Image (spheres, rainbow, N blue to C red):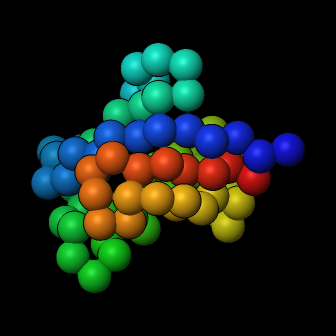
């Protein structure tokens, strides 16, 4: 069963971390820069670590080029 979460991404942060704001809503800080998909890759890695799941089970549904993203966790 998949789950959809909303995330707000802050790039150029001092550290990589994730915090729950509300039910199925999270904020992610990443040191990555939003060029060539680097921030999206970092977001997937941070989510995988937070939920202790494989990165391959995570998909960005919308917001590839936005700070606001919808993420599917399979």
Q: Residue at x 20, y 53 (%)?
A: 11
Q: Residue at x 41, y 40 (%)?
A: 7
Q: Camera-side residue: 55 or 14?
A: 55
Q: Camera-side residue: 9 or 55?
A: 9
Q: Position of residue 42 (x, y in %)?
A: 39, 61
Q: Quadrant of the N terminus?
A: top right
Q: Is residue 6 above or below residue 73?
A: above
Question: Residue reaching furthest bottom?
Answer: 36
Question: Residue reaching furthest right?
Answer: 1
Question: Residue reaching furthest front?
Answer: 62
Give the left or right position of residue 15, taking residue 62 as reference.
Answer: left
Q: Position of residue 50 (x, y in %)?
A: 55, 39
Q: Residue at x 70, y 40 (%)?
A: 3
Q: Is residue 42 visible?
A: no
Q: Position of residue 23 (x, y in %)?
A: 55, 19
Q: Is residue 73 above or below residue 44?
A: above
Give the left or right position of residue 65, taking residue 4 as reference.
Answer: left
Give the left or right position of residue 14, taking residue 60 as reference.
Answer: left
Q: Residue at x 52, y 60 (%)?
A: 60
Q: Is residue 40 visible?
A: yes
Q: How many marks?
A: 0
Which image quadrant is residue 33 in?
A: bottom left
Q: Camera-side residue: 6 or 40?
A: 6
């Amino acid at each position: 069963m998949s789950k959809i979460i909303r995330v707000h991404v802050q790039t150029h942060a001092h550290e990589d971390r994730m915090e729950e704001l509300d039910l199925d809503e999270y904020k992610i800080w990443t040191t990555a820069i939003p060029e060539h998909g680097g921030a999206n890759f970092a977001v997937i890695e941070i989510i995988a670590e937070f939920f202790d799941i494989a990165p391959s089970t995570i998909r960005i549904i919308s917001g590839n080029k936005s700070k606001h993203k919808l993420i599917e966790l399979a």
